[in-house]
Every structure is written in C-alpha cells, then in structure tokens.
Image: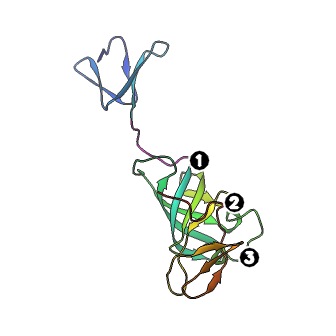
Amino acid sequence: MAESEEYLPAEGTYEEDGKVYAAAMGELELDNDEKVARVRPFNPIAELKPGDFVFCAVTDVRNCMAICDVVAIEGREREISGETSATIHISKLSSDYVQDASREVRPSDLIRAKVIQAKPSVQLTTAGPHLGVVKALCKRCRAPMTRKDKSLYCANCERNESRKIADDYGDVEF
C-alpha cells in the first residue's frame, strides 16, 4: 500500500480513498522517477506476442493457408487469454517453396509455430527446422504416425504422408 499523494496507481494497482492498493498478488515496484506504484504479478496472464513459440491444433487447411487454434505458449503453464484463432499463410509454412498448404499440414495435426503478429489477428510461421508438425494422425485410419526419413509413416495401414515436420517430431510433451 502507498499513499496516492506520493505515488499514482499503475499496472496491477488501484486507488481508493487516497490510498494505492495492489490489484493482484505480485512484486511491488515503486518508480521514483515517474512517481507510480506497480505490481508485477508472480504468474502473469499469458497473452500472445510476436516472438512467442506456440503449440497449435490445425483446424482447417485451404490452398493458401492453414487455420489453427493456439492451445499453449511453449514454456508457459497458464491458459492463454485473448484471441487464440490463428492463420499461417502459405508463404510462412516453410523456408522452401510450397505449392499447396495441405501438403505441409493437415487438420488435427499438432504443430509448433512462431507468432509473427498478435494484433489485429494472430499470424504464425512454421518456417524453420524446430517448427512444424510435432504430432500427427494418419489421414486414412487416424492411427498415430511415426517419422520415417523426411515423411511420416503409419504402421497400421502402411501409408506414407508428407508434412512440414519439426526436428523433434514425436518427442514433444505439453
């Protein structure tokens, strides 16, 4: 608590009856230069921002883009607040030329992507060796697929499928 005559309320604080109170549990910061009191939460809300690495479930694939739901920010335990629907333009799926987005990702694939834009809409990229599909199911029988060279293999129906595969495909837990 601080006096409003000494400090103005800022992020994580509010003023009531001339006193500044914390709005959340966290670490108090008193900025003597700007004369404001802030509280930095111990476990801040998880909001998407450019540069974040995220895990997504692909919900739809069109010729020129993939649509997905962001399910987690890598390294964060908190649920994401705000917009979680995202798109990946065909030019951002791979470092290589991509003719059709459905050859790189498929609905129900779990992918790791990087946020390149958070507002006004969430835009992602999977270009890069650590980005791409981390878990996938066979298009025909829905069995889990394993990595076999540069493609995915279904042992159940002996089918090979191509995808933009992350370098740690199958080793990801979230």
Marks 3 and 1: CB-CB under 8 Å? no
Answer left or right for 11 relative to 66: left
* 75 in relation to 133, above or below: above
Q: How far is the residue under mark 1 from the one under mark 2? A: 15 Å
- Front: mark 3 or 2: 2
Residue 121 visible in the picture: no
Question: Horizontal and vertical percent for residue 44?
Answer: 41, 39
Q: Report crowding for label 3: few under 14, some 14 to 19, many 20 or more residues within 10 A (C-alpha).
A: few
Q: How far is the residue under mark 3 from the one under mark 1? A: 26 Å
Residue at (60% x, 64% y) in the render:
169
Answer left or right for 97 relative to 63: right
Q: Which residue is mark 1?
A: 50
Bounds of the magenta segment? 43-52
Q: Quadrant of the N terminus?
A: top left
Which numbered marker is on residue 127?
Answer: 2
Predominant secondary structure in magenta? loop
Q: How far is the residue under mark 3 from the one under mark 2? A: 15 Å
Q: In terms of sequence position, does the residue under pointer 1 or pointer 2 come before the other? A: 1
* 15 in relation to 94, above or below: above
Residue 8 visible in the picture: yes
Q: Tell me the kind of residue under disc 2.
A: Ala
Question: Horizontal and vertical percent for residue 80?
Answer: 42, 51
Q: Which residue is mark 3?
A: 99
Q: Per the image, is 48 magenta? A: yes
